Amino acid sequence: MKVRNGYWLVVLLSLAYCAKGEIATFEDLTLPPESYWNGADGSGGFHSGTAAFRNNYDSTWDSWDGFAYSNIADTATSGMAGQYHAVAGSGQGASANYAVGFVGWAEPPTVTLDTARSLCGLYVTNICYPYYAMRDGDAFSKKFGGDTGDEPDWFLLTITGKNNAGHATGTVDFYLADFRFDDNGLDYIVDTWQFVDLTSLGEVQSLEFGLSSSDVGAWGMNTPGYFAMDTLVGVSDYPCAGPYTEAGINGYVGSDGRHAGPDDDDAIVNPIFRGWATAVVSYNPAPGVDLQWSNPNKALGRVTGYGFDIVSLGDLNSEQIERSEEPGEITLSFSETICNGAGYDFTVFENGLFSRINTTGGSVAGQMFAELAYVEVSSNGQDFARFPAVSLTAAPVGSYGTIEISKVYNLAGKHPNAGGFCAGTPFDLQELAEDSDVVSGLVDINNIKYVRLVDIPGSGDFYDDAARHIDPGAWSSGTSYTNNHPIYDAWVTFGSSGFDVEAVGVLREQEYGGDINLDSAVDIHDFALFASAWRSHFGQANWLKRCDVAQPKDLIIDVRDLAVLAAQWLQVEQW
């Protein structure tokens, strides 16, 4: 980053944030620099935020188990001397303090909440003692993978939720090291803070932590039984997720590359688009669509942005839903193959609009009058994979009601394409990489030729795929979930009812992830968005997904992402 932008770097690094939903961050604990607390005062534990952390200390042997806490930044110390050293070198998000868990001789490390509640998750990483033991081996532990690297070793953290009656609500597993891959290049030992989702545990009063390893002997596990933990996040709003603040893709831009309306003097079709839907494969609307809105060819070609050049999928009423009638749908094909490139891959344009008024009918100024649809893709026209969607609107909104779009993800129709705006909802094929049909080869996300849009009657009788969005691998294995959410939008609508399709555009591959606002240049506008999300993580109010630009993505906006933004500063896409 050039010197003239140094001021903005200082501003960014000094930003503070409000972490809504956080239960424990350990920053309310006091320690001298480069030190730790291990329970030697005999207190039996400590509190951070609204959670209690159990500790057992044995003064006879000067030993402990349960939880300690530390602010040691040194990452080079191995062996027992490194038992209080997080290998990440700091707390999560570059904070100072973090907890150290040790599974020892007494009860397991346990966190008890002040009141039973649902949890979003927490962050974990390795402690230096087990990290170096796994990486290099020592007098008690083997080198993971063995001399050849082919041995299938693993180190597993298991988190068990318990309700206020002490009964288990479920378990979540997270591999702190995994060498079971056929390709040794995929083997890993965690050395950064990683988010562990705990939503599947439901409402819990406490968490218990256990460790297991492939390296065991006559006396049990040989791998040192330590892990580091930070930033326990609870549910702050209904329910636990988001916000989902992905930018819409502008259909038109002006000479300065910014959003433009189709009637603006210097407006051109956004050069990020390399193709549009070219043929209608099938069109099956729900009953009752007015004739003027029933021409499926209106979904072909480029977006117009006027809000009237659309085809309607129709809307089911309550009687039709009760009779299990199918929602309206349309399948489109493309002469341009849609591939899983860097960034978003295609965009769907509906004709939703921002409300400017508050009414007793459910309209809230600044929210979207939206009609939503599921999005599915196919390579052969027969087998379709549906994007795992999330909808967090808590209650019905009525026929003229609006929704907060930050509560919606991977559903078409959440961006405005009327009333002076022309923006579409983008989709990234990478999010289908673990779908069962993709894994089996029925759908090739590098050779997508068909997009299907399925209307969602916003009555709450149709559900999102929140569980699959959180854990697509578990979904594919047939796990049953109960924490999906009913989808609400404006319902029942009439005339051009239900989801209205204006266009589906194929996107050029994005070279620079630092172009957060997708206007083709990595510049001060992207920096402003990045600054607003600095040090946030998934689940916080200021989280912006597109700011998580470093690979692999870790759901944290931190110095890794800042380094990418700096390296790409002032670069321009060659569209």
Image: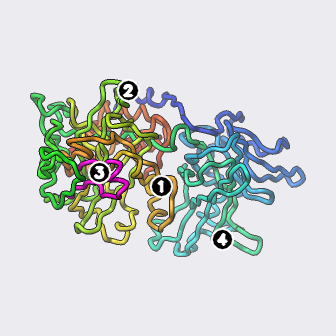
Q: Nearer the viewer, mark 3 or mark 2?
A: 2
Q: Residue at x 39, y 51 (%)?
A: 389
Q: Which residue is mark 2?
A: 360
Q: Marks 1 and 3, Cα distance to the nearest angstrom?
A: 21 Å
Judged from this view, the residue extending furthest toward the right is 60
Q: Nearer the viewer, mark 4 or mark 1?
A: 1
Q: Which mark is residue 436?
A: none
Residue 541 in view of the camera: yes
Image coordinates for residue 112, horizontal then vertical, percent: 71, 46
Q: Is residue 348 left or right of residue 144?
A: left
- Find the magenta span and give its range: 313-331
Which amino acid type is marked by label 1? Ala
Residue 78 in view of the camera: no
Q: Residue at x 76, y 75 (%)?
A: 218
Image coordinates for residue 396, horizontal then vertical, percent: 41, 40
Q: Marks 3 and 2, Cα distance to the nearest angstrom?
A: 26 Å
Q: Residue at x 45, y 34 (%)?
A: 542
Q: Which residue is mark 3?
A: 455
Which amino acid type is marked by label 2? Thr
